Image (cartoon, grey):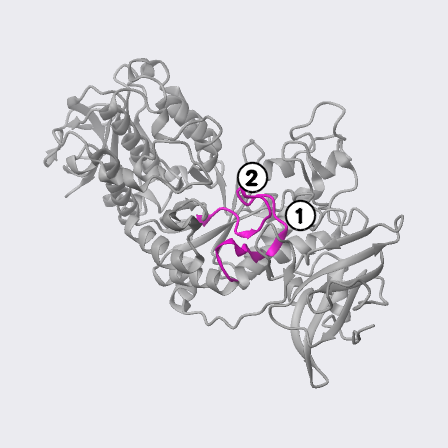
């Protein structure tokens, strides 16, 4: 039998923190770590398997032979098995062979803390370390202002496997190639941030990355861990933040994954009513187990620490919050107070957010949460969940439903748009037009728009113009920015060839300019989460399907007057009440020719008149283009 030396990276303090659920850097201890012990080079291994009676490291260095390298169990009842194996180093493949006390069950598992894994469908872990030298100091030292809640925050959501492909070679772009092509494109489009659908290792392509088996390893589909660091680095060097999708809500039952890890329900809740997700046929973490909390919070910290991420978008929060989520009566058990809230998951999310913001006060956590659960984006100190932002799913649903209607019927449904303002400031809302809205028969965003070609594209431009002038931060899924015709297909590249056609190129130009407009107008972001930043001028003109409102920042001289015409009939000399006398200059018009608009309904410098209108002392007459948005600013 080969020798496994007694060696440990754990102190007694580490063990106490781990057991109490308060160790947030477990990745520095668990997993495989290349080191030197008594002058001999090798690798230290550590794994949590409290129900095991024997744990062996099997790999290409011992011909995958069980029992060759048996780890030592710690004496402190932590359930940790560890040891140093000489002459094992970077690039070696390995797994853990675990014999359980439960019915002598034997499992063969990838390392939960592995920094690199084999390319699926292969499933082994790889001993790995890198000495990547970061070049993003300027970004990291100033990013607090870029990630702030009172800063412009416009996010481009990307699925790395389908954004663009090397079609002639039948392959994905690599992290290295995306560090060039994706970064330059996002910069050209003027987005402030990129959000990546899960990059953590996952076995099954159709899951889009939401069924994770390697929580600490960037997927090997696109290259090495250090190449992913290069992608992040290049984004930062170009003044672009990066948000990672993070999935603490569930994980797959794949044999090499976390499920039934040591022959027991180690990571998943043992009660299927709390531990199995019927929608996704996956397992749910046991949020009440301290060691599992440490694992998950350490994972969140890992991506912020080791990969310089600027934020985490937490997936499927609603499924974590409620015990009856997607369950019928009798399939769930109430909490200790008789309610449907998952108290352990709520406690976990609060602890996670406290840890993240405590260690990285210059990042954001964003909840993908679809219910009316209160105070998701409020501080934990006042009873909130502690997220920085929350997706505004109601806005998305109501807005897309409205825009799908023929304009002739819209006057009967104006409330679909105005309703969002009744709750817009109850949370720090992000407005999403995400990947979930362009799959499973929902059609592309463009595909939902009614009318002939000109109207469909005008409607799309109007939707985006409304989105960018509505309070809240923004997120737009890849392809939507140029009017992708078809639903998103994760197996194929976006239809970049469409940009040769004027309507699609026009939408792309609009998004570029909307991003610039958002960044350059403080009224659109300084108070984007406060009711002080928004004021209706008129929401009652349903007969004309016109909405008008003010967006306000810290300086009233920077305020914007926004008018939106939801019909294909232009509104000439349309009267709007305004806050004070002066001259109004048009600063945005979604109907410009460069956007594939008509270009006919521009406004010169408009002088206000002392004619009361919309309960205001002054008014102005303007031209509002068909299916168009115009925004004005006082010029004096």
Judging by the rendered image, the residue that carries numbered circle 2 is 375
Q: Residue at x 41, y 29 (%)?
A: 421
Which one is closest to the eye, mark 1 or mark 2?
1
Q: Who is closer to the viewer here, 214 or 521?
A: 214
- Total numbered circles: 2
Whether pointer 1 and pointer 2 mark residues with C-beta atoms closer than 8 Å, the reply is no
Let me know if residue 199 is in the magenta part.
yes
Judging by the rendered image, the residue that carries numbered circle 1 is 348
Q: Who is closer to the viewer here, 454 or 105?
A: 105
Query: What is the distance, in whole Å, between disc 1 and disc 2 at their CAs?
Result: 15 Å
Identify the element where label 1 is drawn: helix
Q: Which residues are magenta?
A: 195-224
In the rendered image, residue 500, in percent from the top left (x then y), is placed at 23, 39
- Badge 2: residue crowd in 10 Å (few <14, some 14–19, many ≥20): some
**Quadrant, the N terminus:** bottom right
In the rendered image, residue 302, in percent from the top left (x then y), is placed at 58, 60
Q: Residue at x 56, y 39 (%)?
A: 375
Side (left or right) of 559 relative to 72: left
Q: Is residue 537 visible?
A: yes
Q: Is residue 433 above or below residue 297?
A: above
Q: Is residue 544 above or below residue 278?
A: above
Q: Can you tell which mark lies on residue 80? A: none
Circle nearer the N terminus (1, 2): 1
In the rendered image, residue 77, in percent from the top left (x then y), is placed at 85, 62
Q: Residue at x 36, y 39 (%)?
A: 479
Side (left or right) of 398 relative to 274: left
């Amino acid at each position: 039998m080969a020798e496994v030396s007694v060696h440990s990276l754990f102190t007694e303090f580490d063990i106490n923190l781990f057991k109490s659920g308060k160790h947030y850097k477990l990745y520095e201890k668990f997993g495989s770590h290349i080191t030197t012990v008594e002058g001999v080079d090798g690798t230290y291994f550590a794994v949590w398997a409290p129900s095991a009676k024997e744990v062996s490291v099997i790999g290409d260095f011992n011909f995958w032979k069980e029992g060759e390298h048996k780890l030592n169990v710690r004496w402190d009842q932590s359930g940790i098995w560890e040891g140093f194996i000489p002459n094992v180093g970077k690039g070696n493949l390995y797994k853990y062979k675990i014999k359980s006390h439960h019915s002598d069950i034997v499992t063969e598992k990838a390392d939960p803390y592995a920094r690199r894994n084999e390319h699926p469908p292969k499933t082994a872990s790889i001993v790995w370390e890198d000495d990547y030298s970061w070049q993003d100091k300027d970004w990291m030292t100033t990013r607090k202002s870029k990630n702030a809640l009172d800063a412009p925050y416009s996010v481009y959501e990307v699925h790395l496997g389908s954004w663009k492909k090397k079609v002639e070679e039948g392959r994905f772009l690599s992290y290295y190639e995306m560090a060039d092509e994706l970064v330059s494109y996002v910069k050209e489009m003027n987005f402030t941030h990129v959000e990546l659908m899960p990059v953590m290792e996952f076995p099954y392509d159709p899951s889009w990355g939401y069924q994770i088996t390697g929580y600490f390893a960037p997927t090997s589909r696109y290259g090495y861990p250090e190449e992913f660091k290069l992608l992040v680095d290049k984004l930062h060097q170009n003044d672009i933040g990066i948000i990672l999708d993070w999935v603490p809500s569930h994980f797959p039952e794949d044999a090499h994954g976390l499920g039934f890890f040591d022959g027991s329900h180690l990571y998943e809740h043992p009660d299927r009513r709390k531990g199995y997700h019927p929608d996704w046929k996956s397992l749910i973490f046991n949020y009440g187990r301290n060691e599992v909390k440490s694992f998950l919070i350490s994972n969140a910290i890992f991506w912020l620490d080791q990969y310089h991420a600027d934020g985490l978008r937490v997936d499927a929060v609603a499924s974590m919050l409620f015990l009856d989520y997607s369950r019928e009566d009798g399939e769930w058990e109430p909490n200790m107070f008789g309610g449907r809230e998952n108290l352990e998951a709520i406690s976990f999310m609060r602890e996670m957010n406290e840890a993240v913001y405590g260690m990285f006060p210059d990042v954001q956590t964003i909840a993908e949460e679809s219910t009316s659960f209160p105070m998701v984006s409020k501080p934990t100190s006042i009873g909130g969940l502690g997220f920085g932002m929350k997706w505004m799913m109601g806005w998305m649903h109501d807005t897309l439903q409205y825009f799908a209607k023929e304009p002739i019927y819209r006057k009967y449904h104006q409330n679909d748009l105005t309703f969002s303002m009744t709750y817009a400031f109850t949370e720090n809302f992000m407005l999403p037009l995400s990947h979930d809205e362009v799959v499973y028969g929902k059609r592309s965003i463009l595909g939902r728009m009614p009318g002939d070609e000109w109207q469909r594209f005008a409607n799309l431009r109007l939707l985006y113009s409304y989105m960018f002038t509505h309070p809240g931060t923004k997120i737009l899924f890849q392809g939507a920015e140029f009017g992708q015709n078809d639903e998103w297909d994760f197996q194929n590249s976006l239809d970049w060839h469409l940009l040769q056609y004027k309507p699609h190129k026009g939408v792309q130009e609009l998004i570029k300019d909307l991003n610039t407009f958002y960044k350059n107008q403080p009224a659109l972001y300084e108070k984007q989460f406060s009711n002080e930043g928004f004021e209706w001028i008129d929401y009652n003109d349903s007969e004309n399907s016109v909405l008008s409102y003010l967006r306000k920042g810290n300086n009233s001289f920077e305020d914007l007057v926004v008018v939106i015409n939801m019909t294909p009939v232009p509104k000439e000399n349309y009267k709007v009440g305004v806050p004070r006398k002066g001259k109004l200059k048009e600063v945005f018009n979604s109907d410009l020719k460069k956007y594939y608009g008509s270009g006919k309904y521009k406004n010169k410098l408009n002088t206000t008149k002392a004619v009361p209108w919309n309960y205001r002392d002054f008014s102005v007459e303007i031209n509002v283009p068909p299916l168009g948005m115009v925004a004005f600013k006082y010029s004096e």
